Structure formats: structure tokens, C-alpha cells
């Protein structure tokens, strides 16, 4: 009887571990995809802001220096 119990415990441990690893794999993959899309969107927005005049940026509540700093911070975080 001890052998059957040990076998069941071992199989439970073996089954639980791969499920957790697959779950964390998919969560990590999803997080990486979301982060890449956020970076892509932010790059697009910064490119658009770079083409605006100082007056247009002022209407949006930001200066050219703030926009440049924001872009540099984003690029250094890579």
C-alpha cells in the first residue's frame, strides 16, 4: 500500500509542476507582447509629437524639452 501512495504523490507532484510552468510561460509571453505593443505605441506617439510646432505642443500642455526628455527616457529604458 505504501508503494501505491508514494506513486500517487509522485504523479501529483509531476502533474502540478508542468501546469504551473506552462501558466507562467504564457503569462510571461503575454506580458512581453503587451510591453512590446506599449513601446510601439509610445514610439508612434513620440514621432507624431516631434513633428508638431512649439505652439501646437503648448496647446497640448507640453514643451519641446519635455517631449525630448520623455523620448530619451523611453529609449534609455530599452
Image: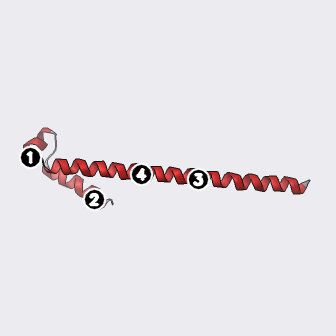
State the residue position of label 4: 33
10 vs 39, left or right, is: right
Residue tagged by mark 1? 54
Q: Which mark is residue 22?
A: 3
CA distance for labels 1 and 3: 50 Å
Q: Position of residue 57 (x, y in %)?
A: 13, 43
In this view, the mark in front (2 or 3) = 3
Q: Is residue 32 left or right of residue 68?
A: right
- Would residue 51 appear left or right of 74 to someone viewing this image? left
Distance between mark 4 and mark 2 Cα atoms? 18 Å
Image spot of residue 29 (x, y percent): 48, 53
> Can the viewer see residue 66?
no
Question: Which residue appears at 89% of the width and 55% of the height?
Answer: 2
CA gap, disc 2 and disc 3: 32 Å
Circle 2 sits on which residue? 75
Of marks 2 and 3, which one's residue comes earlier in the chain? 3
Q: Secondary structure at mark 4?
A: helix
* Gap between marks 1 and 4 measured at Cα: 34 Å
Q: Nearer the viewer, residue 59 or 32?
A: 32
Q: First in sequence: mark 4 or mark 3?
A: 3
Amino acid at each position: 500500500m505504501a508503494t501505491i501512495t508514494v506513486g500517487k504523490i509522485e504523479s501529483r507532484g509531476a502533474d502540478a509542476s508542468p501546469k504551473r510552468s506552462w501558466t507562467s510561460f504564457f503569462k510571461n509571453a503575454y506580458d512581453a507582447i503587451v510591453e512590446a505593443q506599449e513601446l510601439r505605441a509610445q514610439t508612434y506617439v513620440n514621432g507624431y509629437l516631434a513633428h508638431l510646432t512649439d505652439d501646437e505642443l503648448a496647446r497640448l500642455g507640453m514643451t519641446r524639452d519635455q517631449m525630448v526628455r520623455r523620448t530619451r527616457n523611453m529609449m534609455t529604458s530599452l
